[in-house]
Amino acid sequence: PEINFMGDCTNGAESFTIDAWIKVNATAPGNQILLYKAIMLGEWQGYGLYLSQGALSSFVGDGLYSYWAIPTGPDLRDGNWHFIAVTVARCGAAGDVITEYVDGTPITSGTFASVGDVSNTADLIIGNAGPFTLANYSGCLDELEFFKRALTAQELQGIYNAGSAGKCKS
């Protein structure tokens, strides 16, 4: 299945959220790719999540322009499980807003000029650095999810609070 987020601000750009539980090995390199779905067209077209010196970071781009969030969160290389999430709210009055969360708490948010269409023909790659100058991911990843909307801070806090009980109740 495709995991693309279509459109630009003239034709209904899709906002999105990516979340997962991760447990990074304590001895892992500082810069590691978690996942990406992107191709290089002068700039990256697509999206990705990675660790920079152990801190969560992300990027989104349309092939002409890309935005790379500056990592400001905690070093996740502590051998514990952490809930991570990135929301991208597209085409707001001030542009696109990308917010990163660790353990249900927003750690960084940035507004940038709205990028165009981030969809592309690349495969979704999980844990393999491929063309990036980052190491492969070293750790566990569980409950990776994609949403075609920007979840609210309250929704993400609720997922984190559910912990090992999970979101699905029978």
Image (tube, rainbow, N blue to C red):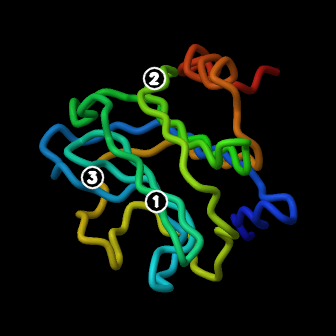
Q: Position of residue 88 (x, y in %)?
A: 62, 46
Residue drawn at x 70%, y 33% is: 151
Q: Earlier along the polypeptide chain: callout 3 or callout 1?
A: 1
* In this picture, residue 68 sits left or right of residue 20: left
Label 2 to label 1: alpha-carbon separation: 19 Å
Task: Determine the secondary structure under disc 1.
Answer: strand
Residue type at mark 1 is Leu
Label 3 to label 2: alpha-carbon separation: 19 Å
Mark 3 against mark 1, which lies toward the viewer? 1
Q: Does 21 appear above or below 1? A: above
Residue placed most toward the observer, 73 or 136: 73
Residue type at mark 3 is Ser
Residue placed most toward the observer, 155 or 144: 155
Residue type at mark 2 is Asp
The residue lying furthest to the front in this view is 94
Name the residue carrying label 3. 138
The residue lying furthest to the bottom in this view is 41
Residue drawn at x 85%, y 58% is: 12
Number of other residues with Cα within 10 Å of mark 3, as a class: few under 14, some 14 to 19, many 20 or more: many
Task: Determine the secondary structure under disc 2.
Answer: loop
* Numbered circle sitting on residue 77: none
Q: Position of residue 17 (x, y in %)?
A: 64, 44
Name the residue carrying label 1. 35
* Numbered circle sitting on residue 103: 2
Q: Quadrant of the C terminus?
A: top right
Q: Does 51 appear above or below 66? A: above
Number of other residues with Cα within 10 Å of mark 2, as a class: few under 14, some 14 to 19, many 20 or more: some
